[in-house]
Image: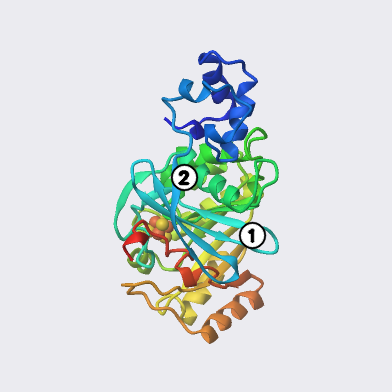
Amino acid sequence: MNLLDLNYEQLKEVVVKKGLPAYRADQIMDMLLCYKDWSEVSNLPKNTSSLFSDYCILPLEIINEFKGGNGVVKFLYKLQDNHLIEGVYLPNNYGNTICVSTQVGCKMRCAFCASGKDGFMRNLTSGEILAQVLLVNKIMGGTSKNRAISNVVLMGSGEPLDNYDHVVSFLKNISAKRGLNLSLRNITISTCGLVKQINKLAKEGLNVTLTISLHSTDDEKRKKLMPIASANKIIDIIAAADNYYKSTGRRVSYEYALTEENSDNSSVEKLIELLNDKNAHVNLIRLNEIEGQEVRGVSERRSIEILDRLNNFGISATLRRSLGSEVEGACGQLKNHFAKK
Ligand code: SF4
Protein backbone atom coordinates (compact mmCIF):
# COMPACT_ATOMS: atom_id res chain seq x y z
CA MET A 1 0.00 0.00 0.00
CA ASN A 2 1.18 3.43 -0.95
CA LEU A 3 0.41 6.49 1.20
CA LEU A 4 0.48 8.68 -1.91
CA ASP A 5 -2.58 6.83 -3.21
CA LEU A 6 -4.62 8.42 -0.42
CA ASN A 7 -6.28 11.79 -0.42
CA TYR A 8 -6.08 14.01 2.66
CA GLU A 9 -9.29 12.69 4.26
CA GLN A 10 -8.22 9.08 3.75
CA LEU A 11 -4.77 9.85 5.17
CA LYS A 12 -6.34 11.48 8.23
CA GLU A 13 -8.43 8.35 8.82
CA VAL A 14 -5.32 6.15 8.67
CA VAL A 15 -3.41 8.52 10.98
CA VAL A 16 -6.18 8.43 13.58
CA LYS A 17 -6.45 4.62 13.31
CA LYS A 18 -2.73 4.42 14.04
CA GLY A 19 -3.40 6.26 17.31
CA LEU A 20 -1.94 9.62 16.30
CA PRO A 21 -3.74 12.96 16.66
CA ALA A 22 -5.45 14.09 13.43
CA TYR A 23 -3.17 17.13 13.02
CA ARG A 24 -0.27 14.75 12.29
CA ALA A 25 -1.98 14.09 8.94
CA ASP A 26 -1.06 17.64 7.85
CA GLN A 27 2.59 17.08 8.70
CA ILE A 28 2.66 13.70 6.98
CA MET A 29 0.87 15.09 3.93
CA ASP A 30 3.44 17.86 3.67
CA MET A 31 6.26 15.30 3.95
CA LEU A 32 4.68 13.23 1.16
CA LEU A 33 4.12 16.24 -1.10
CA CYS A 34 7.79 17.21 -0.66
CA TYR A 35 8.66 13.59 -1.57
CA LYS A 36 10.57 13.17 1.67
CA ASP A 37 11.28 10.08 3.73
CA TRP A 38 10.57 9.84 7.49
CA SER A 39 14.27 10.40 8.12
CA GLU A 40 14.16 13.75 6.30
CA VAL A 41 11.60 15.40 8.60
CA SER A 42 12.08 16.47 12.20
CA ASN A 43 8.55 17.43 13.24
CA LEU A 44 7.19 13.90 13.72
CA PRO A 45 7.67 11.59 16.73
CA LYS A 46 10.53 9.11 16.24
CA ASN A 47 8.26 6.05 16.25
CA THR A 48 6.01 7.36 13.43
CA SER A 49 7.84 5.48 10.65
CA SER A 50 7.40 2.15 12.47
CA LEU A 51 3.65 2.83 12.82
CA PHE A 52 3.47 3.10 9.03
CA SER A 53 5.76 0.19 8.20
CA ASP A 54 2.89 -1.41 6.24
CA TYR A 55 2.86 1.56 3.83
CA CYS A 56 5.22 2.57 1.07
CA ILE A 57 5.82 6.33 0.95
CA LEU A 58 8.27 6.82 -1.93
CA PRO A 59 6.99 4.53 -4.70
CA LEU A 60 9.61 5.32 -7.30
CA GLU A 61 13.20 6.49 -7.66
CA ILE A 62 15.21 7.97 -10.50
CA ILE A 63 17.87 5.57 -11.73
CA ASN A 64 19.06 7.42 -14.81
CA GLU A 65 18.66 10.76 -16.53
CA PHE A 66 19.54 12.24 -19.88
CA LYS A 67 19.94 15.97 -20.39
CA GLY A 68 19.01 17.53 -23.73
CA GLY A 69 19.11 21.12 -24.99
CA ASN A 70 16.99 23.94 -23.54
CA GLY A 71 17.07 22.32 -20.09
CA VAL A 72 15.01 19.27 -21.16
CA VAL A 73 15.69 16.24 -18.96
CA LYS A 74 14.43 12.71 -19.49
CA PHE A 75 14.20 10.55 -16.39
CA LEU A 76 14.14 6.81 -15.99
CA TYR A 77 12.21 5.79 -12.88
CA LYS A 78 12.25 2.43 -11.11
CA LEU A 79 9.03 1.36 -9.43
CA GLN A 80 8.81 -0.76 -6.28
CA ASP A 81 8.25 -3.92 -8.35
CA ASN A 82 11.31 -3.05 -10.50
CA HIS A 83 9.28 -2.05 -13.56
CA LEU A 84 10.75 0.95 -15.38
CA ILE A 85 8.94 4.00 -16.71
CA GLU A 86 10.07 7.28 -18.21
CA GLY A 87 9.16 10.92 -17.84
CA VAL A 88 10.36 14.23 -19.21
CA TYR A 89 10.93 17.64 -17.64
CA LEU A 90 10.43 20.52 -20.08
CA PRO A 91 11.30 24.01 -18.82
CA ASN A 92 9.64 26.94 -20.50
CA ASN A 93 9.28 30.64 -19.90
CA TYR A 94 5.53 30.24 -19.26
CA GLY A 95 6.20 27.56 -16.63
CA ASN A 96 7.91 24.21 -16.24
CA THR A 97 6.14 21.13 -17.49
CA ILE A 98 6.48 17.50 -16.54
CA CYS A 99 5.31 14.74 -18.83
CA VAL A 100 4.21 11.70 -16.81
CA SER A 101 3.50 8.06 -17.61
CA THR A 102 0.23 6.43 -16.58
CA GLN A 103 0.93 2.78 -17.39
CA VAL A 104 3.92 0.46 -17.68
CA GLY A 105 3.79 -0.12 -21.44
CA CYS A 106 0.56 0.35 -23.35
CA LYS A 107 -2.13 -1.84 -24.93
CA MET A 108 -2.89 0.50 -27.82
CA ARG A 109 0.05 -0.39 -30.12
CA CYS A 110 0.05 2.84 -32.15
CA ALA A 111 2.43 2.42 -35.07
CA PHE A 112 4.35 5.65 -34.44
CA CYS A 113 4.87 5.08 -30.70
CA ALA A 114 7.64 3.41 -28.74
CA SER A 115 5.61 2.95 -25.56
CA GLY A 116 3.40 0.18 -26.81
CA LYS A 117 6.10 -1.78 -28.66
CA ASP A 118 6.85 -4.06 -25.69
CA GLY A 119 3.18 -4.54 -24.81
CA PHE A 120 1.32 -3.73 -21.64
CA MET A 121 2.58 -4.64 -18.16
CA ARG A 122 0.31 -2.88 -15.69
CA ASN A 123 -1.52 0.30 -14.70
CA LEU A 124 0.21 2.82 -12.47
CA THR A 125 -1.66 3.77 -9.31
CA SER A 126 -2.66 7.38 -8.71
CA GLY A 127 0.18 7.65 -6.17
CA GLU A 128 2.75 6.38 -8.68
CA ILE A 129 1.60 9.00 -11.21
CA LEU A 130 1.70 11.72 -8.54
CA ALA A 131 5.14 10.58 -7.34
CA GLN A 132 6.63 11.41 -10.76
CA VAL A 133 5.51 15.04 -10.34
CA LEU A 134 6.60 15.27 -6.69
CA LEU A 135 10.04 13.78 -7.24
CA VAL A 136 10.90 16.04 -10.18
CA ASN A 137 9.44 19.03 -8.32
CA LYS A 138 11.80 18.23 -5.44
CA ILE A 139 14.84 17.79 -7.70
CA MET A 140 14.12 21.09 -9.41
CA GLY A 141 14.08 22.89 -6.05
CA GLY A 142 10.32 23.03 -5.53
CA THR A 143 8.35 22.40 -2.35
CA SER A 144 4.69 21.61 -1.72
CA LYS A 145 3.87 25.33 -1.42
CA ASN A 146 6.41 26.78 -3.81
CA ARG A 147 6.24 24.51 -6.83
CA ALA A 148 8.94 24.23 -9.48
CA ILE A 149 6.42 22.50 -11.76
CA SER A 150 3.42 24.41 -13.08
CA ASN A 151 2.10 22.15 -15.84
CA VAL A 152 1.56 18.41 -16.08
CA VAL A 153 0.91 16.49 -19.28
CA LEU A 154 -0.26 12.88 -19.18
CA MET A 155 1.54 12.05 -22.36
CA GLY A 156 4.22 9.57 -21.32
CA SER A 157 3.87 5.83 -21.69
CA GLY A 158 0.33 4.49 -21.43
CA GLU A 159 -3.15 5.55 -22.48
CA PRO A 160 -4.44 7.63 -19.52
CA LEU A 161 -8.12 6.88 -20.16
CA ASP A 162 -7.38 3.15 -20.22
CA ASN A 163 -6.32 3.60 -16.57
CA TYR A 164 -9.41 5.69 -15.86
CA ASP A 165 -9.97 5.31 -12.10
CA HIS A 166 -6.35 5.86 -11.07
CA VAL A 167 -6.00 8.82 -13.43
CA VAL A 168 -9.18 10.46 -12.08
CA SER A 169 -7.93 9.94 -8.48
CA PHE A 170 -4.59 11.44 -9.49
CA LEU A 171 -6.36 14.51 -10.94
CA LYS A 172 -8.41 14.97 -7.78
CA ASN A 173 -5.41 14.49 -5.47
CA ILE A 174 -2.95 16.74 -7.31
CA SER A 175 -5.51 19.56 -7.58
CA ALA A 176 -6.84 19.26 -4.02
CA LYS A 177 -6.29 22.25 -1.72
CA ARG A 178 -4.64 19.87 0.74
CA GLY A 179 -2.72 18.28 -2.11
CA LEU A 180 -0.38 20.08 -4.47
CA ASN A 181 -3.20 22.54 -5.26
CA LEU A 182 -2.28 22.53 -8.94
CA SER A 183 -4.96 24.01 -11.17
CA LEU A 184 -6.69 21.43 -13.35
CA ARG A 185 -6.42 23.93 -16.18
CA ASN A 186 -2.67 23.33 -16.10
CA ILE A 187 -3.08 19.60 -16.64
CA THR A 188 -3.43 17.99 -20.05
CA ILE A 189 -4.60 14.47 -20.78
CA SER A 190 -3.55 13.03 -24.10
CA THR A 191 -5.73 10.19 -25.36
CA CYS A 192 -5.85 8.09 -28.49
CA GLY A 193 -9.60 8.74 -28.55
CA LEU A 194 -11.52 6.35 -26.29
CA VAL A 195 -15.05 7.60 -26.91
CA LYS A 196 -16.76 6.02 -23.90
CA GLN A 197 -14.16 7.31 -21.46
CA ILE A 198 -14.12 10.84 -22.97
CA ASN A 199 -17.88 11.04 -22.41
CA LYS A 200 -17.43 9.73 -18.86
CA LEU A 201 -14.67 12.25 -18.13
CA ALA A 202 -16.93 15.06 -19.37
CA LYS A 203 -19.24 14.29 -16.43
CA GLU A 204 -16.53 14.31 -13.73
CA GLY A 205 -16.41 18.09 -13.34
CA LEU A 206 -12.64 18.04 -13.79
CA ASN A 207 -11.84 20.74 -16.30
CA VAL A 208 -8.57 19.35 -17.57
CA THR A 209 -7.35 20.04 -21.07
CA LEU A 210 -7.95 17.16 -23.41
CA THR A 211 -5.87 16.43 -26.46
CA ILE A 212 -6.86 13.68 -28.85
CA SER A 213 -4.42 11.86 -31.10
CA LEU A 214 -6.33 11.96 -34.37
CA HIS A 215 -3.55 11.48 -36.91
CA SER A 216 -5.89 10.59 -39.77
CA THR A 217 -9.19 11.70 -41.25
CA ASP A 218 -10.02 8.26 -42.61
CA ASP A 219 -11.13 5.41 -40.33
CA GLU A 220 -9.48 2.69 -42.44
CA LYS A 221 -6.14 4.51 -42.64
CA ARG A 222 -6.37 5.40 -38.94
CA LYS A 223 -6.73 1.71 -38.05
CA LYS A 224 -3.34 1.04 -39.62
CA LEU A 225 -1.75 3.73 -37.46
CA MET A 226 -3.83 3.13 -34.35
CA PRO A 227 -5.47 -0.29 -33.94
CA ILE A 228 -7.86 1.15 -31.33
CA ALA A 229 -9.52 3.03 -34.22
CA SER A 230 -11.44 -0.17 -35.03
CA ALA A 231 -13.59 0.45 -31.97
CA ASN A 232 -13.61 4.27 -32.03
CA LYS A 233 -14.78 5.95 -35.25
CA ILE A 234 -13.51 9.44 -36.06
CA ILE A 235 -17.02 10.89 -36.23
CA ASP A 236 -17.79 9.53 -32.74
CA ILE A 237 -14.49 10.84 -31.35
CA ILE A 238 -15.25 14.32 -32.64
CA ALA A 239 -18.79 14.15 -31.20
CA ALA A 240 -17.34 13.07 -27.81
CA ALA A 241 -14.81 15.92 -27.95
CA ASP A 242 -17.62 18.37 -28.71
CA ASN A 243 -19.56 17.00 -25.75
CA TYR A 244 -16.43 17.43 -23.60
CA TYR A 245 -16.15 21.06 -24.71
CA LYS A 246 -19.83 21.73 -24.01
CA SER A 247 -19.62 20.13 -20.54
CA THR A 248 -16.32 21.64 -19.40
CA GLY A 249 -15.85 24.78 -21.48
CA ARG A 250 -12.38 23.47 -22.36
CA ARG A 251 -11.48 23.55 -26.03
CA VAL A 252 -10.20 20.17 -27.20
CA SER A 253 -6.96 19.89 -29.15
CA TYR A 254 -6.31 17.35 -31.86
CA GLU A 255 -2.84 15.95 -32.36
CA TYR A 256 -2.07 15.32 -35.99
CA ALA A 257 1.38 13.78 -36.62
CA LEU A 258 2.20 14.57 -40.22
CA THR A 259 2.93 11.40 -42.17
CA GLU A 260 3.21 10.70 -45.89
CA GLU A 261 -0.17 8.97 -45.62
CA ASN A 262 -2.21 11.76 -43.97
CA SER A 263 -0.66 14.90 -45.44
CA ASP A 264 -2.09 14.88 -48.98
CA ASN A 265 -4.54 17.59 -50.05
CA SER A 266 -7.68 15.45 -49.72
CA SER A 267 -6.79 14.49 -46.12
CA VAL A 268 -6.22 18.12 -45.22
CA GLU A 269 -9.56 19.13 -46.80
CA LYS A 270 -11.30 16.31 -44.88
CA LEU A 271 -9.74 17.60 -41.65
CA ILE A 272 -11.13 21.06 -42.40
CA GLU A 273 -14.57 19.56 -43.10
CA LEU A 274 -14.54 17.58 -39.83
CA LEU A 275 -13.50 20.52 -37.63
CA ASN A 276 -15.11 23.34 -39.58
CA ASP A 277 -17.80 24.27 -37.04
CA LYS A 278 -16.02 22.99 -33.90
CA ASN A 279 -14.30 24.99 -31.20
CA ALA A 280 -11.07 23.03 -31.51
CA HIS A 281 -7.36 23.41 -32.00
CA VAL A 282 -5.08 21.33 -34.20
CA ASN A 283 -1.52 20.55 -33.12
CA LEU A 284 0.39 19.54 -36.21
CA ILE A 285 3.43 17.50 -35.22
CA ARG A 286 6.59 16.93 -37.14
CA LEU A 287 7.08 13.20 -36.64
CA ASN A 288 9.99 12.19 -34.42
CA GLU A 289 12.31 9.51 -35.69
CA ILE A 290 12.33 6.37 -33.57
CA GLU A 291 14.25 3.19 -34.06
CA GLY A 292 12.32 0.59 -36.08
CA GLN A 293 9.55 3.03 -37.00
CA GLU A 294 7.86 2.28 -40.33
CA VAL A 295 5.79 5.46 -40.63
CA ARG A 296 7.53 8.27 -42.53
CA GLY A 297 7.12 11.98 -41.82
CA VAL A 298 6.84 14.87 -44.31
CA SER A 299 9.13 17.81 -45.08
CA GLU A 300 9.10 21.02 -43.10
CA ARG A 301 7.85 22.85 -46.20
CA ARG A 302 4.80 20.58 -46.54
CA SER A 303 4.13 20.92 -42.78
CA ILE A 304 4.04 24.70 -43.10
CA GLU A 305 1.75 24.50 -46.17
CA ILE A 306 -0.74 22.44 -44.15
CA LEU A 307 -0.52 24.81 -41.20
CA ASP A 308 -1.24 27.78 -43.49
CA ARG A 309 -4.17 26.00 -45.16
CA LEU A 310 -5.84 25.33 -41.78
CA ASN A 311 -5.16 28.81 -40.42
CA ASN A 312 -6.36 30.47 -43.62
CA PHE A 313 -9.61 28.55 -43.32
CA GLY A 314 -10.05 29.84 -39.77
CA ILE A 315 -9.12 26.64 -37.95
CA SER A 316 -6.84 27.29 -35.01
CA ALA A 317 -3.65 25.32 -35.63
CA THR A 318 0.00 25.30 -34.64
CA LEU A 319 3.01 23.33 -35.75
CA ARG A 320 4.68 21.82 -32.72
CA ARG A 321 8.41 21.98 -32.33
CA SER A 322 9.72 18.63 -31.12
CA LEU A 323 10.95 19.86 -27.76
CA GLY A 324 12.66 16.94 -26.11
CA SER A 325 13.24 14.93 -29.26
CA GLU A 326 17.01 14.88 -28.92
CA VAL A 327 16.72 12.81 -25.75
CA GLU A 328 13.90 10.76 -27.27
CA GLY A 329 11.57 12.42 -24.84
CA ALA A 330 9.00 13.80 -27.23
CA CYS A 331 5.51 12.36 -27.54
CA GLY A 332 5.48 8.78 -28.71
CA GLN A 333 9.11 8.21 -27.81
CA LEU A 334 8.83 7.18 -24.20
CA LYS A 335 9.17 3.54 -23.39
CA ASN A 336 10.03 1.31 -20.53
CA HIS A 337 13.39 -0.13 -21.50
CA PHE A 338 15.50 2.97 -21.84
CA ALA A 339 18.20 1.30 -19.73
CA LYS A 340 18.81 -1.34 -22.40
CA LYS A 341 19.89 1.25 -24.96
S1 SF4 B 1 0.59 6.86 -28.54
FE1 SF4 B 1 -0.28 6.70 -26.50
S2 SF4 B 1 -1.99 5.27 -26.75
FE2 SF4 B 1 -0.68 4.99 -28.56
S3 SF4 B 1 0.71 3.29 -28.00
FE3 SF4 B 1 1.72 5.23 -27.48
S4 SF4 B 1 1.26 5.56 -25.32
FE4 SF4 B 1 -0.21 4.05 -26.10
Classify 267 as above or below 239: below
Q: Give residue 284's position: percent from left, percent from top.
A: 54, 71
Q: Nearer the viewer, residue 208 or 157?
A: 157
CA separation in Å, label 2 and label 1 = 20 Å
Q: Position of residue 104 (x, y in %)?
A: 37, 49
Tag count:
2
Report if the beta carbon of the residue with label 2 is closer than 8 angstroms to ligand 1: no
The three-letter code of the residue at mark 2 reads Gln
Image position, residue 330 (x, y; %): 49, 66
Q: Residue at x 36, y 69 (%)?
A: 221
Q: Marks 2 and 1: which is nearer the front?
A: 2
Q: In this view, does 130 lie above or below 329?
A: above
Question: x%, y% of residue 202?
Answer: 56, 43
Say if residue 27 shows up in the picture: yes
Q: Is disc 1 placed on a helix, strand or loop?
A: loop
Binning the other alpha carbons within 10 Å of mark 1 as few (below 14), some (14 to 19) or many (20 upward) gives some
Query: On the image, numbered disc 2 is attached to which residue?
Result: 197
Q: Is residue 194 visible?
A: no
In this view, the residue in front, 185 or 203, is 185
- Tell me the SS state at disc 2: helix
- Quarter of the image for the N terminus: give it: top left
Is 322 placed above or below 141 here? below
Circle number at residue 279: 1
**Which circle's residue, 2 or 1, is located before the other in the chain?**
2
Q: Which residue is drawn at 66% across and 72% down?
A: 314
What numbered label is drawn on residue 187? none
Tell me if 273 is positioned left or right of 94 in this view: left
Amino acid type of the residue tagged 1 in the rendering:
Asn
The answer to which of 19 and 245 lies nearer the viewer is 19
Q: How would you rate the neighbour count of disc 2 (Cα within 10 Å): few for under 14, some for 14-19, many for 20 or more?
A: some
